[in-house]
Image (cartoon, rainbow, N blue to C red):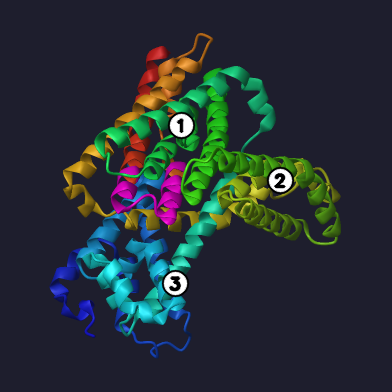
């Protein structure tokens, strides 16, 4: 089978090499190789992942130069790289764009090797047949290794991302901001959910109820990191407004994760059953209650066993083991792994490592030690999410209409949450502060795609909602706060 790369005129590749030199070089090297061209079978994986990281670095650097959040730069460069490289015939991008479908196809083949023709028939569209063609080609094994490694790294990145969000969650601060933040969070989760479900039924009635539920749940997410950065720039990070937004965002995360667990349970069970929903809520309660009650005792016991290690070793081992075990237990309980990761971050604190002296005098905090893993792995997730955005889906006006409806629901739902503030405060600023979806919205979209309830068009629509809300929030928030002063 002739590789598509050999049929592409080299002159046409010049723009791609100019825009994405690292990624193009990696893909080119892998594409021209054969299974026996490398002394080490892991070499193509190293080259492919490194190329992806180089793309992420370009996106982050460009975003910083333009004064935009890093996540936007990585996401947008992924969209550009994925769609441009796909158009120029990079087979590796085809596998990455299809995401979970690749591994589902492999699993079907392994389940019954005689299903080849039937599987091909189920993948009626051109991308499905092209995917099978690439997997059966001379470099198919190498492409599959790279795609699988990138997928695993991105999943690890999400776990560490939510773990760091949990580390930054201060339960005492949540208690201080109190009722205002709770009301803001409740409105900020419930209203976008209701509006998102309503928009889905009104604009795309052919979609399933499960898809409508997941789209609504994804709109309830909030990424407060971008808002905090704006407040710091305006020297209002210690104001009551900032504390209210931060507390609401934390409650928003917790409520959103619980909603994700419930919606996922409904999708997996195949319908709304009071008994099953009660089971999901009960398991979530048991998991969270057990983690918060038993977690500190288990941590102290494990840390005591490791007291003869260096502080850095102890913090790294304990942190990694704790977050992974809770992520696995959350999955075992029917919840998403990110719920376990977030819970681990909330529970685990530097103060537990008392055998090495007061934690205030430690040279490195848990966040300092985990941050390098997050810096490397999380950009892979964002770029991969960008690659999986298929711009051609927006050629369908029905998709464009639904995306616009979801965007309106996302904006209106969050702006209205400012009404939850009872005391005199800038309600517009609170609503705008809760507006950006950022990385949390992407995680929801990725989980929905993995479950098969969010297709390529819906996934692309959600990513566009994430991009637009994240772009709108900082400048509008600055205008609102400056007018107040």
- For the residue labelled by badge 2, is the local secondary structure a helix, a strand or a loop? loop
Question: For the residues marked 1 and 3, what is the alpha-carbon distance in whole angstroms?
Answer: 42 Å
Boundaries of the magenta span: 440-462
Question: Observer-nearest residue: 15 or 180?
Answer: 180
Q: Which residue is mark 1?
A: 227
Q: Which residue is mark 3?
A: 107
x%, y% of residue 19? 25, 60
- For the residue labelled by badge 3, is the local secondary structure a helix, a strand or a loop? helix
- Which label lies toward us, 2 or 3? 3
- For the residue labelled by badge 1, is the local secondary structure a helix, a strand or a loop? helix
**Horizontal relation, residue 98 to residue 214: left or right:** left
x%, y% of residue 40? 48, 85
Tags 1 and 3 touching, CB below 8 Å:
no
Q: Residue at x 44, y 58 (%)?
A: 380
x%, y% of residue 97? 33, 62
Q: Which residue is mark 2?
A: 348
Question: For the residues marked 2 and 3, what is the alpha-carbon distance in whole angstroms?
Answer: 37 Å
Image quadrant assignment for residue 132: bottom left
Image quarter hosting the N terminus: bottom left
Q: Residues within 10 Å of mark 3 (few under 14, many from 20)?
A: few
Q: Residues within 10 Å of mark 1 (few under 14, many from 20)?
A: many
Instruction: Indicate yes or no whether the magenta region holds residue 441.
Output: yes
């Amino acid at each position: 089978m002739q590789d598509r790369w050999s049929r592409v005129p080299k002159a046409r590749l010049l723009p791609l090499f100019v825009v994405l030199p690292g990624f193009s070089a990696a893909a080119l090297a892998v594409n021209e190789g054969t299974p026996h061209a490398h002394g080490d079978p892991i070499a193509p994986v190293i080259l492919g992942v490194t190329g992806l990281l180089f793309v992420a670095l370009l996106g982050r650097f460009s975003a910083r130069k333009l004064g935009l959040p890093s996540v936007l730069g990585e996401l947008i460069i992924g969209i550009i790289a994925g769609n441009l490289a796909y158009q120029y015939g990079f087979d590796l991008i085809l596998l990455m764009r299809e995401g979970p479908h690749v591994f589902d196809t492999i699993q079907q083949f392994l389940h019954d090797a005689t299903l080849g023709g039937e599987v091909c028939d189920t993948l009626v569209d051109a991308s499905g047949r092209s995917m099978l063609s690439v997997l059966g080609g001379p470099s198919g094994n190498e492409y599959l290794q790279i795609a699988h490694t990138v997928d695993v790294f991105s999943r690890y990145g999400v776990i560490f991302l939510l773990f760091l969000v949990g580390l930054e969650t201060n339960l005492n601060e949540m208690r201080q901001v109190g009722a205002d933040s709770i009301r803001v969070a409740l409105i900020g989760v419930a209203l976008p959910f209701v509006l998102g479900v309503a928009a889905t039924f009104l604009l795309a009635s052919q979609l399933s109820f499960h898809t409508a539920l997941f789209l609504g749940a994804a709109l309830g997410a909030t990424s407060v990191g971008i808002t905090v950065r704006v407040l710091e720039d305006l020297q209002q990070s210690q104001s009551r407004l900032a504390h209210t937004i931060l507390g609401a965002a934390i409650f928003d995360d917790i409520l959103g994760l619980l909603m994700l667990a419930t919606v996922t349970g409904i999708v997996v069970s195949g319908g709304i059953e009071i008994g099953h929903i009660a089971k999901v809520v009960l398991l979530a309660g048991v998991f969270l209650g057990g983690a918060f009650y038993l977690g500190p005792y288990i941590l102290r016991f494990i840390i005591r066993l490791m007291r003869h290690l260096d502080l850095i070793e102890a913090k790294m081992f304990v942190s990694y083991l704790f977050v992974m075990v809770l992520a696995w237990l959350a999955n075992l309980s029917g919840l998403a792994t990110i719920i376990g990761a977030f819970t681990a971050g909330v529970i685990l604190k530097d103060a537990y490592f008392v055998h090495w002296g007061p934690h205030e005098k430690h040279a490195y905090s848990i966040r300092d030690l985990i941050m390098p893993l997050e810096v490397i792995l999380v950009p892979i997730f964002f770029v991969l999410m960008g690659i999986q955005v298929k711009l051609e889906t927006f050629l369908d006006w029905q998709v464009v209409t639904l995306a616009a409806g979801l965007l309106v629901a996302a904006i209106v739902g969050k702006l209205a949450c400012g009404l939850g503030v009872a005391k005199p405060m800038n309600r517009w600023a609170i609503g705008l502060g809760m507006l950006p979806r950022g990385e949390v919205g992407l995680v929801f979209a990725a989980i929905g795609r993995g479950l098969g309830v969010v297709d390529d068009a819906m996934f692309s629509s959600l990513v566009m909602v994430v991009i637009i809300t994240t772009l709108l929030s900082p400048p509008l928030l600055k205008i609102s706060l400056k007018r107040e002063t």
